[in-house]
RNA sequence: UGGGGGAUAGCCAAGCGGUAAGGCAACGGACUUUGACUCCGUUAUGCGAAGGUUCGAUCCCUUCUCCCCCAGCCA
């Protein structure tokens, strides 16, 4: 289902034309993350686009770490990024680092200086900002703009050799301080930073800026189509300028697509990192995080993520995709392939008064009704069971098909039971209910004497295994105003984003292992938590609930 | 405000001068040992607005409105 797909969008059209017209011999794309954080679902879209398009045209895709800012980058992230890309199902052709090219970049910058197209500026960061002009006013030329080539060459070399402090000087492109495109007002190409680089250590103390480095990286790698998000659109003239003026033999082209936004989800790495750093979540892989590792820990599958981003398509219109669409794709993926099981998240004890004490019956249960080949399993049934608290109401609302005094329901894979009595504690809370069962209604017996409106799930009281269930809601929730990025992140957090419940799973889940996924019947899809699951402490993360047409929950 | 992009249903999105695909959501209904799944049906005389060109406009032209991005020595 996933493979039978023939996408067409403006980028694929461009690539197709380039190949047909002979302008491009081999399609080469790249996924260029900066190793300054973990990948999120937005990156999944970019990964999908870059890898799939190259694959469709028989091309190649590189994984390239855009590590030009040592202050923010870390080897931890490069490892995590590789894991995430592979987990999503993609294998790169080449793996590179921008830092692999630092020497060549330096030489290209020297070329620029020699051509009179770059100069060393002694102005401070503040001065540069102040003289950049505004949206409506042109900027001012730097007093160092016409520094002689020879002097620039010497200064730039001294920059490289650590003769200046951080921020003392920068290398700037000599473009146009009056350009209506702010990116072209003599953009900074190199800055001084005496920082330890995760890859090159202290070899360098000057680092190229993205705008200079990225086009060179693409050109060096023979990238044909450099596919990035829309906010880089204004950089395109600069991108082309760098490739041209640096006299790169290979000319890559940049094309931009709209980035993914999801409702109730923050996607900025800055904010995600803040959540992690301030301990507001359980790390980058907290199941509430929109990171790939968070989704993985939550129980999402690569297939679901891929089919989700595939359906989004490639466009330039900005918008916000409903999180429900992602939920649809994970349900769609899991439903046919995951075993059913019964779990009671909020237990209520039920005594079946006419069922013989001490007797245990093994009941047949289909592993997955959607796929007979998955077989059946045996689950124990006895006099005492647990059902879901919400499946009993003393005073039921209209259209309530579950248990209430006098009503009969089907216990899934077992018998019909009828509620006869309610036991309450001193505060009037229901603590236990008494039911009777009808032996003739045994599951699989073909009994058709009477129909019952509701079927509820349960676990056997004597063999049930205690389990912890973690239910999730959006990490951030609130009105549009409350969710404004200008509001402090902490106050935008949804206090109910995590709910921990202690209940039971059936004995058939005795041998579950981390990452095992189930559909807990009538509840939703769950995964054994990879971090906290132990054989003696069963922890399940809710991936997504089941859809429900029953109004209240 | 200068520049760059965008506007098709509640959300995403096809459409490329010939009379508005599809998915999600929602709402009905069928089926059901999951109020699930599946299946059927409903939901834009309308494409941000107003003019114009044309036999014919979501598509071309003009003007206007609204939204997003750019003033890091971040990427």
Image (cartoon, rainbow, N blue to C red):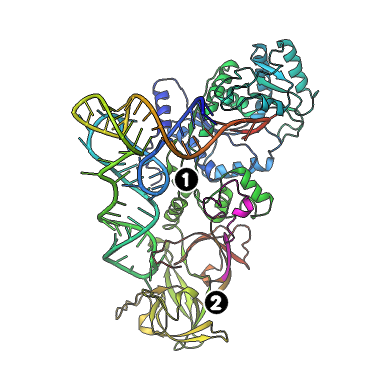
Q: In this view, does A329 lie above or below A353?
A: above
Mark 1 secondary-structure assignment: loop
In the depicted view, which residue is nearer to us: A297 or A149?
A: A149
Q: In this view, does A41 lie above or below A427?
A: above
Q: Is the magenta stretch mostly helix, strand or loop?
A: loop
In the depicted view, which residue is nearer to us: A496 or A248?
A: A496
Residue A126 in the figure: left or right of residue A379: right
Mark 1 and mark 2: Cα distance apart in space: 47 Å
The location of residue A506, given as percent across then percent down, is 52, 72
The location of residue A522, given as percent across then percent down, is 44, 67
The location of residue A492, given as percent across then percent down, is 59, 53
- In the rendered image, is residue A220 in sight? no
Q: Does the magenta stretch include residue A495?
A: yes
Camera-nearest label, 1 or 2: 1
Magenta residues (range):
A475-502
* Label placed on residue A320: 1
**Circle 2 residue:** A463
Residue A254 in the figure: left or right of residue A73: left
Mark toward the start of the polypeptide (1 vs 2)? 1
The image quadrant of residue A190 is top right
- In the rendered image, is residue A499 in sight? yes
The residue at the point 76 percent across, 17 percent down is A155
The extreme right residue here reads A163
Chain hosting mark 1? A
């Amino acid at each position: 289902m996933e493979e039978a797909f023939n996408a067409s969008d403006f980028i694929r059209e461009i690539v197709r034309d380039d190949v047909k017209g002979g302008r491009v011999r081999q399609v080469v794309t790249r996924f260029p993350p900066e190793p300054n954080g973990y990948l999120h679902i937005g990156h999944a879209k970019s990964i999908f686009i870059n890898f799939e398009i190259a694959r469709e045209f028989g091309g190649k895709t590189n994984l390239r770490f855009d590590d030009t800012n040592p202050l923010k980058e870390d080897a931890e992230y490069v490892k995590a990024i590789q894991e995430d890309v592979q987990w999503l199902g993609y294998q790169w052709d080449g793996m590179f680092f921008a830092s692999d090219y630092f020497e060549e970049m330096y030489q290209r910058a020297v070329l620029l200086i020699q051509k009179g197209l770059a100069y060393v500026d002694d102005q401070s960061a503040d001065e540069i900002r102040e003289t950049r002009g505004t949206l409506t006013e042109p900027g001012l030329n730097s007093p160092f703009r016409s520094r002689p080539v020879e002097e620039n060459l010497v200064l730039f070399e001294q920059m490289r050799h650590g003769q200046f402090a951080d921020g003392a000087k920068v290398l700037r492109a000599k473009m146009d301080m009056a350009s209506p495109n702010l990116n072209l007002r003599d953009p900074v190409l190199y800055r001084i930073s005496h920082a330890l680089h995760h890859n090159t250590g202290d070899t360098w103390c000057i680092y190229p800026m993205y705008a200079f480095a990225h086009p060179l990286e693409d050109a060096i790698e023979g990238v044909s189509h450099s596919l990035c998000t829309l906010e880089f659109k204004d950089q395109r003239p600069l991108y082309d300028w760098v490739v041209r003026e640096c006299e790169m033999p290979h000319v890559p082209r940049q094309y931009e697509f709209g980035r993914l936004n999801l409702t109730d989800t923050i996607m900025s790495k800055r904010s995600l990192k803040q959540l992690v750093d301030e301990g507001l979540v359980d790390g980058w892989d907290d199941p509430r995080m929109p990171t790939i590792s968070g989704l993985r820990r939550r129980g999402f599958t690569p297939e679901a993520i891929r089919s989700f981003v595939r359906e989004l398509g490639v466009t330039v219109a900005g918008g916000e995709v409903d999180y429900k669409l992602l939920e649809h794709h994970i349900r769609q993926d899991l439903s046919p392939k995951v075993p059913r099981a019964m779990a009671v998240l909020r237990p209520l004890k039920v005594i079946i008064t006419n069922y013989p004490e001490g007797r245990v019956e093994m009941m047949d249960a289909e592993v997955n009704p959607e796929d007979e080949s998955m077989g059946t399993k045996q689950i124990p049934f006895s006099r005492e069971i647990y059902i879901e608290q919400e499946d009993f109401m003393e005073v039921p609302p209209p259209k309530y098909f579950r248990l209430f005094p006098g009503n009969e329901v089907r216990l899934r894979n077992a018998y019909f039971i009828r509620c006869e009595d309610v036991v309450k504690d001193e505060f009037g809370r229901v603590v236990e209910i008494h039911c009777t069962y009808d032996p003739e209604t045994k599951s699989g017996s073909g009994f058709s004497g009477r129909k019952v409106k509701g079927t509820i799930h349960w676990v056997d009281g004597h063999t049930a295994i205690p389990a912890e269930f973690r239910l999730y809601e959006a990490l951030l929730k609130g009105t549009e105003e409350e969710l404004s990025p200008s509001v402090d992140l902490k106050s935008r957090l949804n206090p109910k984003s995590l709910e921990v419940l202690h209940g039971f799973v059936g004995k058939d889940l005795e041998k579950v292992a981390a990452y095992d996924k189930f559909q807990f019947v009538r509840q939703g899809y769950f995964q054994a938590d990879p971090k906290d699951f132990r054989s003696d402490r069963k922890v399940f993360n809710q991936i997504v609930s089941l859809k429900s047409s029953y109004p209240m929950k």
